[in-house]
Amino acid sequence: MLISSLSIYAQNKSMNSKFYSIKVKDIEGREFKLDEFKGKTILVVNVASKCGYTPQYDGLQKLFNKYKERDFVILGFPSNDFLWQEAGSDKEIIEFCTLNYGVTFPMFSKISVRGSNQHPLYTFLTSKVTNPNHNGFITWNFNKFLVDKNGNIVTRFGSKTEPLSKELITELEKVL
């Protein structure tokens, strides 16, 4: 039994280090690894400015404001993969988010969340190998992945799940 537990621990630790070793660029173009967020509960969201779900920025910001003091962070990754709903430059995206929704949570450079140019973060989040319980391609803008303080993917929410929904908040509070 001990060998089995050690094996699971080693496998989880390996997956965690893979998550934290992924490189991203913030909306200003600075590159760094996700280990900057080690020890925080993370909600990773692919976002877009011209989508029917764009008003979720408001709920995301309220969620961030409510829980940021409890080591919670939202990471917004703009993507133009769905009907060109994020065609603007990084500068235009952050201006839109700040002016219209007062976004203060970390935003990142536009990436591809599916297809042949999929960013390594989304390959990690959607792969059956690294995310056996919540894998599968990104269906639309505003898919959400909840990651615990150890880099484990806890659950996934589709676009229709509002940031302030009881379902999302219940799962978030379990891992905070």
Image (cartoon, helix red, strand yellow):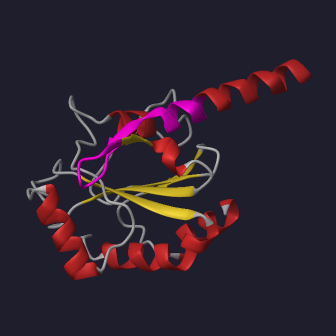
Is residue 71 visible in the rendered image? The answer is: yes
Instruction: Using the image as rendered, state which of residue 47 and residue 104 is in the foreground.
Output: 104
Residue 99 appears at what percent x and percent y? 20, 80
Residue at the image position 37 percent from the left and 61 percent from the top: 106
**Magenta span covers which residues?**
15-31
Residue 91 appears at what percent x and percent y? 14, 61
Residue 127 appears at what percent x and percent y? 44, 32
Instruction: Give above or below for 95 relative to 58.
Output: above
In the visual, does 39 lie left or right of 112? right
Residue 25 inside the magenta-drawn segment: yes
Instruction: Give above or below for 31 relative to 108.
Output: above
Residue at the image position 60 percent from the left and 73 percent from the top: 69
Is residue 164 visible in the rendered image? The answer is: no
Q: The C terminus is located in which quarter?
A: bottom right
Instruction: Using the image as rendered, state which of residue 21 and residue 28 is in the foreground.
Output: 28
Residue at the image position 44 percent from the left and 62 percent from the top: 74
Residue 33 appears at what percent x and percent y? 43, 39
In the visual, does 12 lie left or right of 55? right
**Residue 132 occupies quadrant:** top right
In the visual, does 96 lie left or right of 64? left
Residue at the image position 25 percent from the left and 55 percent from the top: 27
Total residue callouts: 0
Instruction: Using the image as rendered, state which of residue 97 and residue 79 is in the foreground.
Output: 97
Instruction: Give above or below for 121 relative to 38.
Output: above
Q: The N terminus is located in which quarter?
A: top right
Residue 28 inside the magenta-drawn segment: yes
